[in-house]
Image (spheres, grey):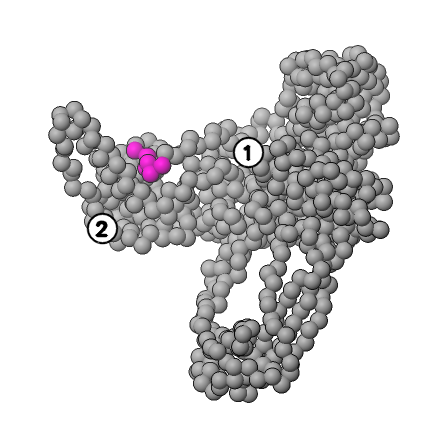
Amino acid sequence: MHLIITEKNITAKKIAQILFGKSTKETKIEGVSVYSSGDTSIVGLSGHIVNIDFPEQYNNWSVTAPKDLIRAETEMKYTHKKIATALKKLSKEATSVTIATDFDREGELIGVEAYRIISDYKPDMKFDRAKFSAITKPEIDRAFSNRVPLDFNLAAAGEARQKIDLVWGAALTRYISLTCGRLGKSFLSVGRVQTPLLALLVDREKEIKAFTSTPYWEIYATLGDSAEFIAKHECNRFEDKKKADTVRAKLGSTGTVAEYKKDARSDAPPIPFSTTEFIRAASSIGFSAANAMRIAENLYVNGWISYPRTDNTVYPSSLNLREVLQNFAAGEFGEYARKLLGMETLVPTRGKKETTDHPPIYPVTSAKKSDMAEDEWRVYELVVRRFFATLAPAATWETRNTTVDISGEKFKASGSKLTEAGWRYYYPYGMPKEEVLPALDVGTTLPVKKIEMPEKMTQPPTRYGQGRLVKMMEDLGLGTKSTRHEAIQKLYARNYVHGNPPQPTNTAIAVVDALERYADLITKPDMTSRLENDMDEIADGKIKEESVVDESQNMLQTIFGVLDKNHDEIREVLFDGLREDKILGKCQTCGSDLMIRKSKKGGRFIGCTGYPNCTFSLPLPPSGTIVATNKVCERHGLSHIKIMTGGKKPWELGCPQCNFEEWQKKKKEAAAAAGEASTGTATAPKKPATAKKPVAKKAEADKGEADKPVKKVAPKKAASKKKVIEKAPEA
């Protein structure tokens, strides 16, 4: 029997349909689906079916110190025992095995894991590898007709990443969490890729908070008779209002055209989609990096697009571009495909990165909108239109620029109009707005219809969007094409960031502050980038996995030397930052800080630091991570809060006091309605609590205030979490 092993069950099923057609028979072994026809069987894994981990004795935080994990032994543990057992049973009848997992570093390692399980059970088994970039009949037929040996170097690079990320994540996470006493579900995660990425966001947030807005003035003139246009003073911004007032006062009622120029500008088409370019484009139309990649993966597995994890921005010569276009000639994109097919030659654009593992992302099969969900269609359409755009000619814009002299002051205006749509016809995303500027003659006198001098304020830098973050990570060597979106998503799951674009929480700022001050090697991308390069060299067969793992352990020992030296200072910064994260505002009863606190029974409430003299308190929902936002309630002066539940959409609770008062009001209305229904008369409501009096029971720590969750909207049940162990999975 010839056994074929794919990365997932859905891939096994799809390939079976391609290779076997209607003769496919599905059976179950250990509950695992196997697709067979004749003397060939196909089985899908579930990604990694074994995982590297520390032995059980290292899981006790009070026994094993963080730095003792650096060179601790590791072992492989089954994550899907039934699949491993199914592989062994299938290999009894097999004479040869073809690994058909995704062709990249991670996929090769998954394939080698299956190879090891079968080889240990049946050492004389013959193995080979099928490599493909799309799950279509031509591509699958080609891959299985041209099988190659397994790439153990590529798998070793993936295994090195596993080992390095396990040790870095576990050791650093344990150190930081123990240092500030954040254990159990509240542990603080630190990692090789995660922390430099978080530092980028925190440093940007500090720039935003440190920014001081200053006023400036701009002067605009509305000119012309029937065809009016607006020109702006050449100074652009006036930081001195007196100077701006002086210029405005001297402006007369007419202006003279001093310069006028009409020109044509070529607008080059975009480059093919690499993973980074795809995520940036998807981000611009509203998709998070993780969601865009999840959808792209589904489209790939279902045979709609090519493999979405690629650094390549150059179509290989083996890709028949006309053949791909022909697939779309009769479908929903037929109008566009036929127009391109009518061109005498197709000259695709080229990016700077060219690799040989996979082509850029392109559509492989024509689909109808009814074939997929709305979000899937939007991503699919983006890929289709991008492919078309890379084959289309440049767009052409007519540009017009003028300078008008008004009483010796120069005003400038410009306009642009699309004259040849070119690639813009196929790819409408990010289309610049046309600005109309009439034809003018030098020396012409124009009436000044209106002068405006608006006051504006300088704006702080903007937060990094996810698309921009992925590009920055690529430039800095943080992560890989396959892991960058996962690293961003991990920050959300760890409750280090919220919102979109991602905004760091005070906890995140405290962690980065402590590390940047006293162990900045962890927050800089240098070490991570160096290790990424080393892993590429493992894949190329230039260096051995063991040497790179040893190098990473030496780096980590250097870092721990710095951490131990500055332990007390790090602890102090962390405590100060984490305390600040719990302060929501001032108590309106006594003026002390209102903080998120815990009762002896484990409940949570907002309590006054003036206790026991002040007993003002507010209840909080019993589960989820509480994040204080920058928005402050005008009425109560309290920060609005979100309830985060491990990467899911946060519950926007808002001002906790407004929320509580609304809950109280609804409760009384319900009680009154119930009383009226039972007695036939209305029950007079009690006087509602005000901000000057406690609005809940006493906030003694032994009684707590988490017994009644706030119910503006019923909170979703928090995602359950497994018992925290010492390792912190790292992207």
Q: Which residue is mark 1?
A: 726
Q: What number is the disc on residue 384?
A: none
Q: In the rendered image, is residue 312 in sight?
A: no
Tell me if 722 is positioned left or right of 554 in this view.
left
Magenta part of the chain: 708-713
- 501 or 137, nearer to the observer: 137
The count of marks equals 2
Residue 78 relative to residue 535: left or right: left
Q: Give the class, few, some or many, for how many residues have Cα within 10 Å of label 2's Cα (few <14, many ≥20).
A: some
Residue kind at label 2, given as amino acid type? Thr
Q: Quadrant of the N terminus?
A: top right
Residue 144 appears in the figure: yes
- Percent coordinates x, y for residue 414 in the rendering: 61, 71
First in sequence: mark 2 or mark 1? 2
The residue sitting at 46% across, 36% down in the picture is 645
Q: Residue at x 33, y 36 (%)?
A: 711
**Helix, strand or loop at mark 1:** loop
Could you tell me which secondary element the residue under label 2 belongs to?
loop
Q: Which residue is mark 2?
A: 589
Give 418 or 682, whichever is nearer the viewer: 418
Residue that lies at the very extreme toward the front in this rendered image: 226
Q: Position of residue 227 (x, y in %)?
A: 56, 73
What is the three-letter code of the residue carrying label 1? Glu
